[in-house]
Image (spheres, helix red, strand yellow):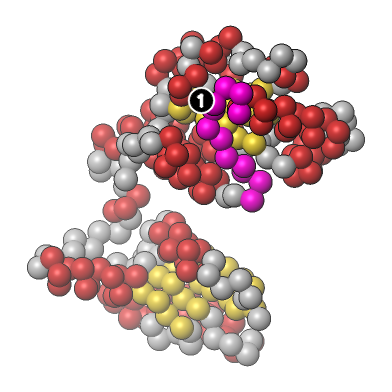
Amino acid sequence: MKRSIFFISDGTGITAETLGHSLLSQFEDVEFEELTMPYVDTVEKAWSTVHQINQLAEASSTRPIIIDTIVNKDIRDVIAKANGFMLDVFETFVGKLGAELCSKPVNTVGKSHSIINNETYNVRIEAVHFALDNDDGARTHHYDRADIILTGVSRSGKTPTSLYMALQFGVHVGNYPLTEDDFDDLRLPAALKEHKKKLFGLIIDADRLSAIRNERKANSKYASIQQCEMETRAVEALFNKENIPYINTTQLSIEEISTRILAIAGIKRRLV
């Protein structure tokens, strides 16, 4: 089964996409063709969007699904005239929440992604800068300021996880790559020894690691299955020997990896 879905917003569309993906992930037997329509902030743009939805509905045997986060009721009412199945975030949640709180919503476009809260914004930016400055073992002398230090073999997911944790949670994350030289005597590199309590390991299945490395350096020793098997066995043995907590990233998304690390390490997020 294949269905078209429109994420419509009078802002960036990030909230509509995020909520939509959470909902759609529950339906594995359906293939979704996604169209994001940001900044639909006038009635004229709304009618143009309705026309596009109706054209698609006419060309297919099923009506499109619409997930919108439009604040302006006049624009919302126009979108509701489209030949689609509409899930309106503000109508579904904000109105009911306002009634429960006995408070009227401000109906401000883009408020969830604004930088009005400068303190929160600054925490996020500082954490991202820290992750970039301490990526791939570049600056180990800043590890005393790290909340956590991710370590593992090359291409096991350290950098994207570090940046995601910084951006979403405001956590100061360093990451350090372990190489073949570090496995000779199964000892932590000197740069990590004094920060052992902050270490968290990432491991990955050898076949997946080989596939990822081949995208970067095809047919190299670095990407060979033999090399990957050696490194993955050695790094897991090192983590077990040094009692370093770790997770296998093979089947996990960046979001899952990050939240599991926070839960296991007991680290409090700075952004909520």
Counting from the top left corner in percent of width and height, residue 33 is at 61, 71
- Report the amino acid beneath label 1: Leu
**In the shown orientation, is residue 2 left or right of residue 163?**
right
Q: Quadrant of the N terminus?
A: bottom right
Q: Is residue 160 visible?
A: no
Counting from the top left corner in percent of width and height, residue 206 is at 76, 40
**Which residue occupies 45% across, 22% down?**
197
Q: Secondary structure beneath disc 1?
A: strand
**Which residue occupies 36% across, 74% down?**
88
Placement of 229 over or under 7, stated as above or below: above
Q: Is residue 114 visible?
A: yes
**Which residue occupies 33% across, 32% down?**
123
Residue 6 included in the magenta stretch of the image: no
Placement of 56 over or under 124, stated as above or below: below
Tell me the magenta residue range. Answer: 240-251
Residue 249 included in the magenta stretch of the image: yes
**Which residue occupies 26% across, 34% down?**
119
Q: Which residue is mark 1?
A: 199
- In terms of depth relative to the viewer, which is nearer, 85 or 22? 22
**In the shown orientation, is residue 15 left or right of residue 213?**
left
Which quarter of the picture shows residue 117?
top left
- In terms of depth relative to the viewer, which is nearer, 146 or 47? 146
